[in-house]
Amino acid sequence: STDDLLLFLEGEQGMQSITRDKCLEIIDRFEPSSEGRLKGHMGIDGFTAYLLSDECELFDPEHLNVCQDMTHPLSHYFIASSHNTYLLEDQLKG
């Protein structure tokens, strides 16, 4: 429902100043069933379509442009990595 979507967007997504009208607009855009749109409800298919849409994209589109020559094999590039990058604390407790 619009109330559930509102709670999700505010609580889980951290969106602020979201309104019920905005939730209805999202439902109208992404809910595939006309019955769901009329009732103001979003099913799993509409919710999945919303989460996978450009509106929910995490990747910054500015980073799509490659500003370096990336035509060489991967082994020709230096990749900075560490075997300890996954650790949360020190090597023994983390």
Image: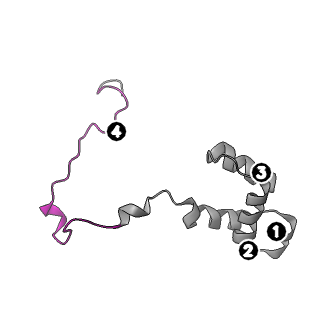
Q: Which amino acid lies under the numbered mark 1 shown in the image of this protein?
A: Gly
Looking at the rendered image, the disc whose residue lies closer to the viewer, 4 or 1, is 1
Where in the figure is residue 89, as x and y percent of width and height? 35, 27
Q: Residues within 10 Å of mark 3 (few under 14, many from 20)?
A: few
Q: Are marks 1 and 3 in contact (CB under 8 Å)?
A: no
Q: What's the CA distance linking mark 1 and mark 3?
A: 14 Å
Q: Which amino acid lies under the numbered mark 2 shown in the image of this protein?
A: Pro
**Does the image show residue 44?**
yes
Q: What's the CA distance linking mark 4 and mark 1?
A: 43 Å
Q: Which amino acid lies under the numbered mark 3 shown in the image of this protein?
A: Asp
Highlighted range, magenta: 65-91
Looking at the rendered image, the disc whose residue lies closer to the viewer, 4 or 3, is 3
Point out which mark residue 4 bears: 3
Mark 1 element type: helix
Q: Residues within 10 Å of mark 1 (few under 14, many from 20)?
A: some
The quadrant holding residue 52 is: bottom right
Say which residue appears at 74% left-offset and 58% top-offset.
23
Whichever of labels 1 and 3 marks the residue nearer the N terminus, that label is 3
Q: Is 73 a magenta residue?
A: yes
**Does the image show residue 52?**
no
Q: Are marks 1 and 2 in contact (CB under 8 Å)?
A: yes
Point out which mark residue 36 bears: 1
Point out which mark residue 32 bears: 2
Mark 3 element type: helix
According to the picture, the residue beneath numbered tag 4 turns out to be 86
Whichever of labels 4 and 3 marks the residue nearer the N terminus, that label is 3
Q: Are marks 2 and 3 in contact (CB under 8 Å)?
A: no
Q: What's the CA distance linking mark 4 and mark 3?
A: 35 Å
Q: What's the CA distance linking mark 2 and mark 3?
A: 18 Å
Say which residue appears at 49% left-offset and 56% top-offset.
58
Q: What's the CA distance linking mark 4 and mark 2?
A: 41 Å
